[in-house]
């Protein structure tokens, strides 16, 4: 099968995500035949470095032998069984391990991040109903927050482009100001911005706590907002406010979890414990769809009752799929065996150094980095910057897809000197090519 035939058939038969399909009249669709380590290979054998970990899911490179072996062993044993009324070893072991890692428990599973968001929101509101405060059923999120795109999750996703067309379907949550460090006024530190945002949250909670079930946020990095980073002190202040006003704190670690921000989970850098945690993306090392929500004993106990309707009756057909659980376990084993967080610290140093020429480019502002996430804002670009940059990056053998005018890199944890240099060179050359093209086109 050649490239152009497969592209034609795809455009006929497949509706691609996050895409205006008409763009493919002039932006090529790229068939990928295989992937290994940090590389994606097209049908002609040309390779691209996966600089965004395939939408932030991949941790240890593609086709990792340990993860592959776990998947093969599991499919030879048990492919799937419904999780209502049944259980199995992979789901039990994974739940125990996630419990140990998060300090929470009672893992509830689904297959994608948006469903995890919905589960956490439903559990929170149902908790208040079960404890005699059914009026606590509204939610609050941060400006620019992203928690998925199903109708329920869109309620707390504050990104107009994803939400506008569906506004009539959505029961909108309130939004409070983001603690985004870039909002610093002259003389303000990131901690000052955090305190200002926390004060706004306090003012809002003071008025609305009686009708509010939960605050949901992405700790430390609002990724979809363009890698907006904030000071960890914000989370400490938020925890105190949620306690004072009796509102659950839901941390959405779907993108930030599993070492991405330098600690196993981002909120741990603030030394706080949330009431709910949402996990997905890196949970399976980027191989199979799986998400989980963990919560406190207090929440769990409010559902434990003789009455059926006081239980959490939510379900998905593939809840706790053994194949997905077994690759998640294999992923956690790689963390246990590999001193991954320590190694990433050194790797991040290598990458930051490799990115220095990009960081110092005259058109770059707000260069920022946390753990294995780098981001740069480019000044004075056109609305098509992101598409154009993506094309130029691909031409230089790297997969990078800016968000608006923000270039970012979120590579797998198995980069080395050579691949870091390749990624950084591609990122810089793509910037120069895109800026030259924009200048030429006026
Ligand atoms: C990706 C993401 C989601 C949604 O996950 P899906 O699997 O795409 O539904 C939710 N929250 C955050 C923070 C994310 O990055």
Image (cartoon, rainbow, N blue to C red):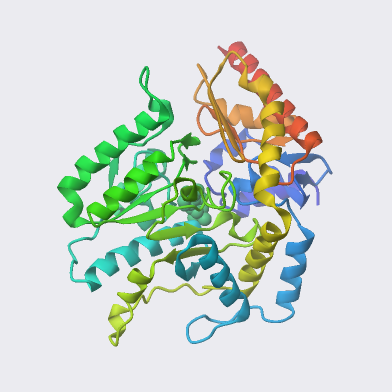
In which quadrant is the C terminus drawn?
top right
Q: Is 268 placed above or below 182 here?
A: below
* Location of residue 6 in the rendering, given as x and y in whole percent from the top left corner: 73, 50
Q: Is 116 placed above or below 44 here?
A: below
- For the residue pair 202 and 134, the one nearer the viewer reads as 202
Q: Quadrant of residue 371?
A: top right
Residue at figure coordinates x 65%, y 62% from the top left:
332
* Location of residue 176 in the rendering, given as x and y in whole percent from the top left corner: 29, 40
- For the residue pair 428 and 102, the one nearer the viewer reads as 102
> In the displayed structure, does residue 423 sit left or right of residue 146?
right
Q: Is 23 placed above or below 329 here?
A: above
Residue at figure coordinates x 40%, y 26% from the top left:
189
Residue at figure coordinates x 59%, y 82% from the top left:
88
Q: Is 132 placed above or below 383 here?
A: below
Instruction: Report the number of numbered marks.
Output: 0
Residue that extends furthest to the right in the rendered view of this protein: 45
> Can residue 433 be seen in the rendering of this structure?
no
* Location of residue 17 in the rendering, given as x and y in whole percent from the top left corner: 54, 49
> Can residue 109 be seen in the rendering of this structure?
yes
> In the displayed structure, does residue 158 sit left or right of residue 34?
left
- For the residue pair 398 and 178, the one nearer the viewer reads as 178
* Location of residue 234 in the rendering, given as x and y in whole percent from the top left corner: 37, 40
Residue at figure coordinates x 33%, y 51% from the top left:
155
């Amino acid at each position: 099968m050649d490239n152009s035939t497969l592209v034609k058939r795809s455009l006929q038969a497949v509706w691609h995500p996050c895409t205006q399909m008409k763009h493919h009249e002039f932006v090529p669709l790229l068939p990928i035949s295989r992937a290994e380590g940090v590389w994606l290979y097209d049908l002609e054998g040309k390779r691209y470095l996966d600089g965004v970990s395939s939408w932030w899911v991949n941790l240890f490179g593609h086709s990792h032998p340990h993860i592959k072996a776990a998947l093969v062993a599991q499919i030879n044993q048990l492919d799937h069984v419904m999780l209502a009324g049944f259980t199995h070893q992979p789901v039990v072991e994974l739940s125990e391990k996630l419990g140990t890692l998060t300090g929470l428990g009672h893992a509830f599973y689904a297959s994608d991040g948006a469903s995890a968001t919905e589960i956490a929101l439903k559990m929170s509101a149902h908790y208040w109903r079960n404890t005699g405060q059914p009026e606590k059923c509204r939610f609050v999120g941060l400006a620019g927050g992203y928690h998925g795109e199903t109708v329920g999750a869109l309620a707390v996703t504050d990104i107009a482009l994803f939400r506008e067309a569906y506004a009539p379907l959505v029961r909108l949550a309130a939004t409070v100001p983001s603690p985004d460090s870039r909002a610093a006024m002259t003389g303000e530190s990131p901690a000052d911005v955090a305190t200002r945002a926390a004060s706004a949250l306090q003012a809002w909670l003071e008025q609305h706590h009686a009708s509010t079930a939960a605050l949901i946020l992405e700790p430390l990095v609002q990724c979809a907002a363009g890698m907006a980073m904030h000071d960890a002190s914000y989370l400490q202040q938020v925890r105190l406010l949620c306690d004072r006003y009796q509102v659950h704190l839901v941390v959405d670690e779907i993108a930030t979890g599993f070492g991405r921000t330098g600690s196993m989970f981002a909120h741990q850098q603030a030394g706080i414990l949330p009431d709910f945690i949402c996990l997905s993306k890196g949970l399976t090392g980027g191989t199979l769809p799986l998400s989980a929500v963990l919560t406190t004993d207090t929440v769990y106990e409010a559902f434990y009752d003789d009455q059926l309707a006081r239980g959490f009756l939510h379900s998905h057909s593939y809840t706790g799929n053994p194949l997905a659980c077994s690759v998640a376990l294999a992923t956690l084993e790689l963390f246990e065996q590999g001193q991954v967080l320590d190694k990433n610290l050194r790797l991040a140093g290598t990458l930051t150094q490799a990115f220095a020429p990009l960081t110092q480019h005259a058109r770059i502002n707000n260069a920022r980095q946390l753990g294995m996430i780098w981001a740069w804002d480019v000044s004075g670009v056109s609305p098509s910057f992101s598409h154009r940059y993506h094309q130029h990056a691909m031409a230089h053998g790297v997969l990078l897809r800016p968000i608006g005018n923000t270039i970012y890199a979120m590579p797998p944890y198995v980069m080395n000197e050579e691949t870091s240099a390749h990624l950084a060179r591609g990122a810089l050359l793509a910037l120069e090519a895109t800026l030259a093209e924009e200048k030429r086109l006026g």
